[in-house]
Image: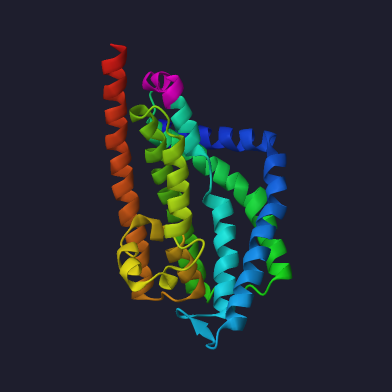
Amino acid sequence: MTTSAAVYRAFIRNKVLESLAFRTRFVVGIPSYFMFVAVHFFIWRAVYAASPEPEIAGYDLGQILTYMAVAWMIRSFYFGRVDHEIAEDVRQGNVVRHLLRPVDYQLARMAEAFGESAFRLLALTAPSAALVYLFFPVAAPAGWAASAAFAVSLLLSFVLFFEMSYLAGLSAAFTENAAGLLRAKAAAVELLSGLLVPLSFFPPWAEGPLEWLPFRAIADVPLNLYLGRYAGREALLMLAFQAGWALVLHAAGRGAWRLVVRRLTIQGG
């Protein structure tokens, strides 16, 4: 292992240890996510009970209940507040310290975010999923191929969510108060990613453009891979779609960081 890889592994380990110190915060989240699933379960069951058709927008009741439950479980994995942490670093000028370190700020932040997500997987996602599978009719992945594609897709979802959060956090260098933008980012991700409702439920004029935006790659793609709605060549194309947007957003993050450093240099001399 190279020295640089060992450094980033240390960032992951330190974040896991930090999360362990605040493990109660994650444990308290278990009933919260269970309640999220319960509320959506009864809402969707009522919607389908009132519908004259067994399917709505291509999903039957079993599929939509599984989609909804898994959606909140994967959110418990990739979700984090790295955007707020980065914005606070920028606002307080702490990013100057990172300029003196022989590490890449973007990769270091990603390593820390991954450490937190790894801890969340064990302390929050896994026990929450166990409760959800125990009390609600959630289907298993649609076969081994779907399980493998879903696992890869979930990791790419984490990268995409991080890159969006990274860009949003750096925006603090160009505005007096980034709180509004951070809230807008969070709302956009939840609505446009397919987390709250599948994209096929949107009107045709909105569904088309949304299929090409990176938000879709965070929730809609992994969830439909889980259900087996994408298979074979189409599944590979969806994974490529996620990877492509991850590379684009990573490059955008690097460009944004250079702008932030230039702004700091101009203001600080």
Residue range corresponding to the magenta coloring: 90-101
**53 left or right of 264?**
right
Picture coordinates of residue 205 (x, y %)? 31, 69
Image height of 178 relative to 94, above or below: below
Q: Does residue 139 appear in this view?
A: no
Q: Residue placed at 72% from the left, 62% from the top?
A: 131
Picture coordinates of residue 48 (x, y %)? 58, 80
Magenta segment, prevailing SS (helix, strand or loop): helix
Q: As rendered, which of 14 and 47 lies closer to the eye?
A: 47
Q: Quadrant of the C terminus?
A: top left
Image height of 58 relative to 213, above or below: below
Quarter residue 252 falls in: top left
Residue 132 covered by magenta stretch: no
Q: Does residue 212 appear in this view?
A: yes
Which residue is the extreme one toward the top?
269
Which residue is the extreme one toward the front?
50
Q: As rendered, which of 87 and 251 lies closer to the eye?
A: 87
Residue 93 covered by magenta stretch: yes
